[in-house]
């Protein structure tokens, strides 16, 4: 293998190492972002359930008032 081929191969290996580091970093960032989004989703589901409960309670009270009039 010539010196030029070795240098080209070394350069390519360095590029692959850089790409791997970049992908690891991006993967870590995406996992962190996913974790935040999962927590936000859980909070939104909880708020939705609370709102649904309130609306159902209001409907029940309105029906009760309607029956008494």
Image: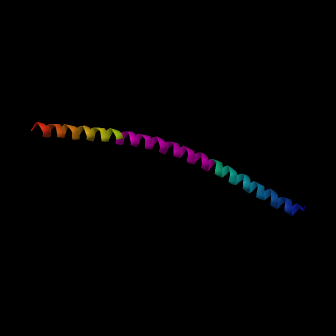
Residue 2 percent location from the top left of the image = 90, 62
21, above or below 53, in the image: below
Q: Residue at x 61, y 48 (%)?
A: 27
Q: Is residue 19 left or right of residue 32?
A: right
Q: Quadrant of the C terminus?
A: top left
Q: Residue at x 65, y 48 (%)?
A: 24
Q: Residue at x 43, y 41 (%)?
A: 42
Residue 4 percent location from the top left of the image = 86, 63
Q: Is residue 1 left or right of residue 46?
A: right
Q: Does 35 appear in magenta?
A: yes
Q: Residue at x 81, y 59 (%)?
A: 9
Residue projecting furthest to the left: 69
Dominant SS in magenta: helix
Q: For this rendering, which residue is in front, 24 or 11?
A: 24
Residue 68 percent location from the top left of the image = 11, 36
Q: How many marks?
A: 0
Q: Does 27 appear in magenta?
A: yes
1, above or below 53, in the image: below
Over which residues does the magenta segment extend? Answer: 25-48
Q: Is residue 53 left or right of residue 9?
A: left
Q: Quadrant of the N terminus?
A: bottom right
Residue 67 percent location from the top left of the image = 13, 38
10, above or below 50, in the image: below
Q: For this rendering, which residue is in front, 55 or 20?
A: 55
- Please tell me in which quadrant of the rendered image residue 12 appears: bottom right
């Amino acid at each position: 293998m010539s010196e030029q081929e070795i240098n080209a191969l070394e350069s390519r290996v360095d590029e692959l190492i850089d790409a791997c580091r970049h992908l690891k970093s991006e993967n870590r960032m995406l996992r962190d972002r996913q974790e935040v989004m999962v927590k936000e989703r859980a909070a939104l589901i909880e708020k939705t359930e609370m709102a649904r409960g309130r609306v159902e309670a209001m409907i029940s009270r309105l029906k009760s008032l309607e029956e008494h009039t």
